[in-house]
Image: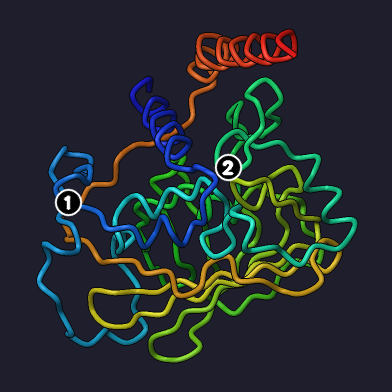
Amino acid sequence: MRKCFLLLLVSALIMLLLSSPMPARAQKSAPVDPDDLEVHVDGWNRPIPRMDQVPKSSAPAPKHDISGTWEPAEGWRNGVQAQGAYNYPMDGKHPLPFTPEGEKAWKEHKYGDGYGSYPLNEVNDPFKMCDPIGFPRVSLHDLRAIQIVPTPKKTLVIYENDQVWRSIWTDGRPFPSITEPRWYGYSVGKWLDDYTFVVDTVGMDERTWIDNAGRPHTKDLKVQEEFHRVNHDLMQITLTITDPKYYTKPWNALDKYPMRLQSDTFDIREMVCSESEAEIYNKEIAEEAAAEQNQKKNTKENSK
């Protein structure tokens, strides 16, 4: 369990170091030496080939089939979205269409890493103390491997992040007339065409954040996902947020985000949040970091 929490911690710290106040597009376009990239491994500690190590394939996609295990196609770093939703990062260049009420709610959320993050002692992220990460944040915060398993009545999506699953009903049922709030909502799906699976989700618990930058939502949040299989090896995910009370128009948190099919022998690693280890982290790391920040602040003020 401790290794699992440390994986979460190391990911957050790495992204904190990488998230300096410079445009995200500049960070994405900067040349990276392939030999400097960290080697990602599966649950059996076997290295996962990078995109530049995998032969390109143009084999056609099977119809009505997105089953299998998928990983972010552009490398593991792009799955860790510390600055917020991949297409709307907190870089000052991607403002969201907030309503006044939505912006007010967002300013009450104090996130702990990413661009413009708050001091650790002020962070009020519900995931900090191991509340469920919830949906859609499970896809917008630290998207790693997912496994998609279709059954005759529903499709299951299993996430490496927080080791959770979602049930997407495909038997034609409508949403329930009364929805008790859920961390991961109520999902129904259907095939739009031979290669595009569309999922609508409602009923998310208002305590969850949309992404790592604390974007808020109301009980009326609706999320639509499109899983479009481009060919045998590549799938694209588009995720659209609709919440009229907090946002003046729908916005695409992910837009054709690429996922690469893994082999049948791929084993998804365990990556969960442990309350006991979160407590240790808050005591041994967060509190010490907050004290150091306060000391620096006091020193700066006294020197004036």
Outermost residue toward the front in this view:
304
User: 74 above or below 16?
Assistant: below
Q: Residue at x 48, y 50 (%)?
A: 81
Q: Quadrant of residue 272?
A: top left
- Real-space CA distance between mark 1 and mark 2, rounded to the nearest whole angstrom: 26 Å
Neighbor class of circle 2 (other Cα within 10 Å; few <14, some 14-19, many 20+) is: many
Question: Is residue 198 shown above or below 11?
Answer: below
Asked whether 176 or 74 is in front, the reply is 74
Q: Secondary structure at mark 1?
A: loop
Residue at image x 81%, y 40%? 108
Q: Which amino acid does the dot numbered 1 rest on?
A: Ile
Mark toward the start of the polypeptide (1 vs 2): 1
Is label 1 or label 2 in front? 1
Residue 275, given in percent of the width and then of the height, sits at: 54, 21
| Rendered image coloring scheme | rainbow
Viewer-nearest residue: 216 or 131:
216
Residue 48, which numbered label?
A: 1
Q: Residue furthest bottom?
A: 193
Report the residue at 51% width, 88% height from top: 192
Residue at coordinates 67% horizontally, 20% vertically from top-left? 121
Residue 222 as seen in the image, left or right of residue 219: left
Label 1 CA crowd tier, 10 Å (few <14, some 14–19, many 20+): some
Give the total of numbered labels: 2
Q: Position of residue 151 (x, y in %)?
A: 40, 68
User: Which label is found at residue 30?
Assistant: none
Mark number displayed over residue 133? 2
Q: Position of residue 205 (x, y in %)?
A: 73, 48
SS class, disc 2: loop
Q: Residue 294 location, x and y as percent?
A: 67, 13
